[in-house]
Image (spheres, rainbow, N blue to C red):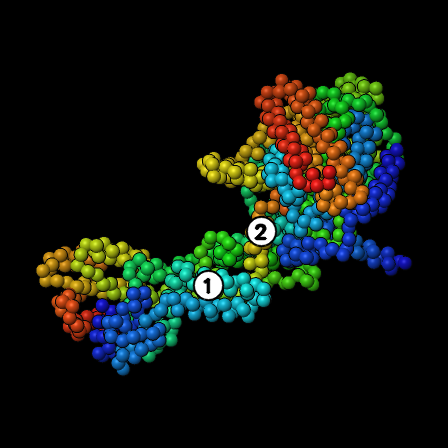
Amino acid sequence: MSAASAWQLSQSHRVLIVSLDPAHNLGDIFGVVLNHKKHRFTDSLYLKEVNLQKLCREYLERETRVLTDTYRYLQTINLDHYFSVLKYSPGIEEYALLTSIEETLRFQKDFDYIVFDTPPTGLTLRFLALPRITVTWIDRLVQIRRDILEKRHTIYRIRGILDDKETILSYDEKDDDILKRLKTLKGNYQTLSSRLQGEDCGIVLVYNPDTLSLKESKRLIDGLRDLKLPLRLLINNKIQIKYKAMADHVDSAMQALAPAVPIQRVALSESLLDGQNSTLYDISETILSPFEMK
Amino acid sequence: MTTLIIFVGFFLYLILYLTYGKKLERDVVKVSNEQPTPSHRLYDGVDYIPARKEVLLGHHFASIAGAAPIIGPALAICWGWAPALLWVWLGNIFIGAVHDYLSLMASVRYDGKSVQFVATDLIGKRTGYAFYWIVFFLLILVVAAFAAIIGGMFVRTPAIASAYLYKIIAALILGVLIYRVKMNFSLATIIGIAMLGFAIWLGVETPIKASYTTWMWVFFFYIFIVSAIPVNVLLQPRDYLNSWLLYAGLVLGFVAAVFAFKGFEVPAFAGFSPVLLGGKPTPFWPAIPLVIACGSLSGFHSLVASGTSSKQLDKETDGLVIGYGAMFLEGFLSTIVVVSIAGFGYTALKTAAAAKAIGFNLNASNWGATFTIISGKLGLSKANLFVQSYADMVASTWLSFIPAQYVKVLAGMWVASFAMTTLDTTNRLARYCLSEMAAPLKESSAGLYNVLTNRWVASIIPATIGIYLAASGNWLVIWGSFGAANQLIASIALMTGAAYVAKKLKSGFANAAVIPAWLLWITVTAAFIWFILFVQPGAIAAKPVPGWAVMIILVVMFLLNFLFIFDFVKSKSYKKAE
Amino acid sequence: MISSMVRWVRRIFADFDATHREKAAALTVMEMEELENIFALLLIGSFAGFSSPPTFLAVELLPYMERELQILCKRAKDCNDMLAEMCGTIGID
């Protein structure tokens, strides 16, 4: 779906489509092989597939380099070993994803539209919630950090410096590297959070005309509402004439869940079912009209 | 006589420190400054920081000094002043200080790990685990003993109660000044001391009268509230003020004792088994360690020495002054107490009897049989006797320009402050012990484990048992049990230390540790047997519920004692040298 | 002679002062260390063998957390031996 929309949009705008789906279908759809770099399909349509594994690895390599510089010899060796385990951890994956979106938004400025194709519901909701959860957690950590600095200040006032060997512990907020870093991170995530919630961003929910999809979508809509993320378009995909009644039913249910959001319908391509090479061009040109820039 | 004894005590400690102490250092512990201590080897700027020995001594001494070195001698005077003094001197020099010193040095050699850890290593896991149980009982008994002492003091001299209340307010204010406002430390100290003086004066002006039972309830709630609030609100500033009280009391007491020039009115030797614990004839051996604990020998010190002091020892040679020397200082404190009571206690009792207009027939011949009973009747037992004698002693010297009532309140505050601090710190520690004791239940009965380790439940159990025992009277039995628990730990710690020097170090002079260790163990075991068979049944007859509570505690500890010696004899470290 | 006596007296006062400051700060120091331990545990507990999930925040902050890591590892090693240390710091008397 996102591929189609991206194509349509690229008829009149410059579009970058980024696939975050671990299924890596984007390249297959366009008939090209994508590595994780931006690939120029046409002048106005660029494709990119995000390789999650690679992303994590790169991310961790970056951090390891910082560590090597900061830590002494002995400790680096121990931590090094640990990092090889880290790259499989779920938390890192989601954060790496989020970081990649954030960076894309920051650096790819010469596009009119950036379309992100996201993985299935559960994962998406989780990582869309990340900025807000992270901000909350950072707040708690900042509070503890402040308490620690407060106590250090008290101790310094009472005791002064004990001896030369003792490293001077920072007790001023201005001097504490950790606190400064926490605040920077909080800023980043708040920015990302507001970006996602803002005017420039919109979420397109693609569902199928069956009850299972309906239920899943309900969960998604509730989740998006909780996160205050703007749902702008609903697309009912793969509708078949003979099941139109079902499609109507699902559509009205969806509309009830999200009253202000327009619904578009896309028919299931018969030729696709027949296994023939089908083109994407059959999809309506106006598929993303709600998103058209004013 | 007072003056003479003070100087004898002083020189005895000094000379033996320099001779026997040095011998211990050289031949038993085999101290060497070539070996860096954990504070250097494991330096982390957190716990392992070398401290100058003078500073560490101050810290260590303040941790071990408290109310117990005062109470013990006040009771032991029933044997006459000579036995009491002999135990304070010789028991300290050859057993108590050795115990402290060995605990410290063994811990230093074990990378600053606690004596509990060393015992686990040298003897067995059960012994390490038993520490939690014995310390837990010790904490309950301490709460009971001290609450009763303070209650008695507050009833007899209400001025102390109000002075203490004002002191708490002063501590709260000081806490805000030092930890919130972060005022200049010296300035805050001066304000704190001034507030302390003011509290004493105001206490005398506005005494608070209340009944013993009322005070018990007050203490019960006090324990809860104070052990739940952050430590820098009350605990820390209060502790800080306490140390100034300690110095004031010590200095005043020392000067007064030197200049008192009074003969002793109390008989030197009043019989081997005067009436004391549980109203029964109490044989000097084995009961003396139960009566005089902290001034001479105290198991709790091994935990302090191996808990924090060992991690901050700069050089191995510093260990002598800190482990051995600090104990001598405390012994000296007890000496001052004995001297003041021996010199002035008799008159104090006589005056009190006259004031109450009851017959007074206490003299040298019936001292042993009647001292405890009479002093109890006159409300001048334990701390009260000390407070009165101390005040009288100061008043008899050129220091008499200080009004006696203020001195009394000062002495009372000294005892009360340390005792009250104990009430809530023991609660904090007891909570921890309880959760460690309950650890084996985690797998087998998770429900019970969760209940026991709940913060409030873990707080209520020791507080309730402690205060209940305090309220139910029969204080002497409680004090004896507290002593028993304390000396049981001492026995384990000294045995551990002895095992360390004998087996691991193979020191030539190891007998200096091994003989006292066995002597102590035999004494403690005998004391337990005597207590369980001869004293406690009387207590149970008088008041069944508290009687049985204490009996159960005693029996459990007694069994742990045997378990310990069994594990010890069986352990590899014992077999190695045989 | 006099000057060395004066020096000696001064030394005593300095030690006295230092002892008091130590004592007044002792519990706060313990509190601070425990808080640092907690902070470290929350953030990077997995690096000391605890089962908390490592997060990217932990990795981000790791370069600055040398002291905290030390405390974490030390506490993890010592947490079974805390009775004596607490008795020493809090004190029963």
Measured from the top left, where is residue B56 in percent x and y? Answer: 72, 51
**Marks 1 and 2, how far apart at CA:** 24 Å
- What mark, if any, has residue B97 been given in the picture? none
| Residue at x 60% of width, y 40% of height | B125
| Residue at x 74% of width, y 31% of height | B289
Q: For mark 1, name the chain.
A: A
* Location of the C terminus of chain B (image quadrant): top right
Measured from the top left, where is residue A152 in percent x and y? Answer: 60, 57
Q: Is residue B393 left or right of residue A53?
A: right
Q: Nearer the viewer, residue B263 or A103?
A: A103
Query: Looking at the rendering, which quadrant does residue A13 occupy?
Result: bottom left
Query: Looking at the rendering, which quadrant does residue A15 occupy?
Result: bottom left
Q: Is residue A25 above or below residue B229?
A: below
Residue depth check, mark 1 versus mark 2: number of the one nearer the observer: 1
Q: Residues within 10 Å of mark 2 (few under 14, many from 20)?
A: few
Residue at the outermost bottom position? A43
- SS for dot 2: helix
Measured from the top left, where is residue B254 in percent x and y? Answer: 82, 40
Q: Nearer the viewer, residue A82 or A243?
A: A82
Q: Is residue A138 left or right of residue C85?
A: left
- SS for dot 1: helix
Q: Residues within 10 Å of mark 1 (few under 14, many from 20)?
A: few
CB atoms of marks 1 and 2 within 8 Å: no
Name the residue that disc number 1 marks: A84
* Location of the N terminus of chain B (image quadrant): top right
Name the residue that disc number 2 marks: C77
* Type of the residue with mark 1: Ser
Query: Looking at the rendering, which quadrant does residue B20 occupy?
Result: top right
Q: Nearer the viewer, residue B148 or B358?
A: B148
Q: For mark 2, name the chain.
A: C
- Whether marks 1 and 2 lie on the same chain: no
In the rendered image, is residue C39 in sight?
Answer: no
